[in-house]
Amino acid sequence: MNNHLKDLRSERGWSQGKLGELLDVSRQTVNAIETGKYDPSLPLAFKIARLFEMAIEDIFIDE
């Protein structure tokens, strides 16, 4: 699944580590989501959406 997570993170000047801290996941998890190697669980997807104040479907692209 593609996503806009890297762009959203970069716009805020956050490192992968900082985003991981905010989401309570590892930097490696953030990297895996950004590169499409890992699809987040539904609870994590909701947490990401709340953090960026966006709808899930505006962040994640179901192809």
Image (spheres, rainbow, N blue to C red):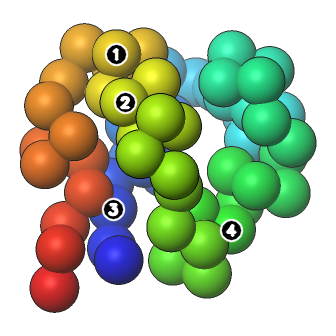
Name the amino acid type tagged 1.
Arg
Question: Which one is earlier in the sequence, the residue at label 4 or at label 1?
Answer: 4
Name the amino acid type tagged 4.
Ala
Q: Which residue is mark 2?
A: 46
Query: Marks 4 and 1: CB-CB under 8 Å?
Result: no
Q: Secondary structure at mark 2?
A: helix
Mark 2–mark 4 Cα distance, whole angstroms, equals: 17 Å
Q: Quadrant of the N terminus?
A: bottom left
Name the amino acid type tagged 3.
Asn
Mark 1–mark 3 Cα distance, whole angstroms, equals: 15 Å
Q: Secondary structure at mark 3?
A: strand
- Total marks drawn? 4
Q: Secondary structure at mark 4?
A: helix
Measured as percent of width and height from the top left, residue 57 is found at: 13, 48
Q: Which residue is mark 3?
A: 3
Residue at image position (86%, 42%) is 26
Question: Which one is earlier in the sequence, the residue at label 3 or at label 4?
Answer: 3
In the image: residue 17, left or right of residue 15: right
